[in-house]
């Protein structure tokens, strides 16, 4: 169910984060945002606290704690020079 405060939240939270919070699919959030004519503010500076969370929490926990998308968290990890996420690369012999 879309709540009265949803429009304000939709303007400041990514589709991915809002979908998790509301228990909806990303497509449903995108559709609702489009129908309401609400644009998401794309740029927002990273705070020292958010950088600390990126460095210390898992990606999923950081998404929940910062209201930033998974893609944004992964990009920030790259910018901060953090190691990979534990994926093992296959070695070609």
Image: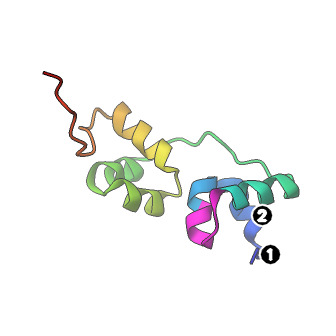
Q: CA distance from mark 2 to mark 1?
A: 7 Å
Q: Residue furthest top?
A: 93
Q: Does residue 51 appear left or right of residue 90 in this picture?
A: right
Whether 20 is drawn above or below 63: the answer is below
Q: Quadrant of the C terminus?
A: top left
Disc 2, disc 1: CB below 8 Å?
Answer: yes
Residue at 76% over, 74% down: 2
Residue at 37% over, 47% down: 51
Residue at 28% over, 32% down: 81
Whether 89 is drawn above or below 21: the answer is above
**Disc 1 target residue:** 4
Determine the image quadrant of residue 21: bottom right
- Residue 19 at what x, y percent from top left? 61, 63
Label 2: element kind? helix
State the extent of the magenta-drawn residues as a range.
18-26
Q: Is residue 64 a member of the stretch shown in magenta?
A: no
User: Residue 22 got which mark?
Assistant: none
Whether 3 is drawn above or below 66: the answer is below
Question: Magenta span: helix, strand or loop, mainly?
Answer: helix
In terms of depth relative to the viewer, which is nearer, 89 or 74? Answer: 89
- Residue 16 at what x, y percent from top left? 58, 55
- Residue 32 at what x, y percent from top left? 79, 60
User: Residue 7 got which mark?
Assistant: 2
Mark 2 neighbour class, 10 Å CA radius: few under 14, some 14 to 19, many 20 or more: some
Residue at 52% over, 50% down: 69
Q: Does residue 53 appear left or right of residue 87 in this picture?
A: right
Q: Is residue 20 a member of the stretch shown in magenta?
A: yes
Q: Residue furthest front?
A: 93
- Residue 62 at what x, y percent from top left? 40, 57
């Amino acid at each position: 169910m879309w709540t009265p405060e949803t429009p304000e939240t939709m303007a400041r939270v990514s589709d991915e984060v809002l979908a998790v919070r509301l228990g909806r699919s990303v497509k449903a959030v995108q559709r609702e945002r489009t129908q309401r004519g609400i644009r998401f503010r794309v740029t927002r500076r990273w705070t020292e606290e958010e950088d600390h969370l990126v460095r210390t929490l898992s990606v999923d926990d950081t998404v929940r704690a910062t209201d930033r998308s998974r893609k944004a968290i992964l990009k920030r990890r790259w910018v901060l020079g953090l190691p990979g996420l534990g994926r093992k690369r296959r070695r070609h012999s």
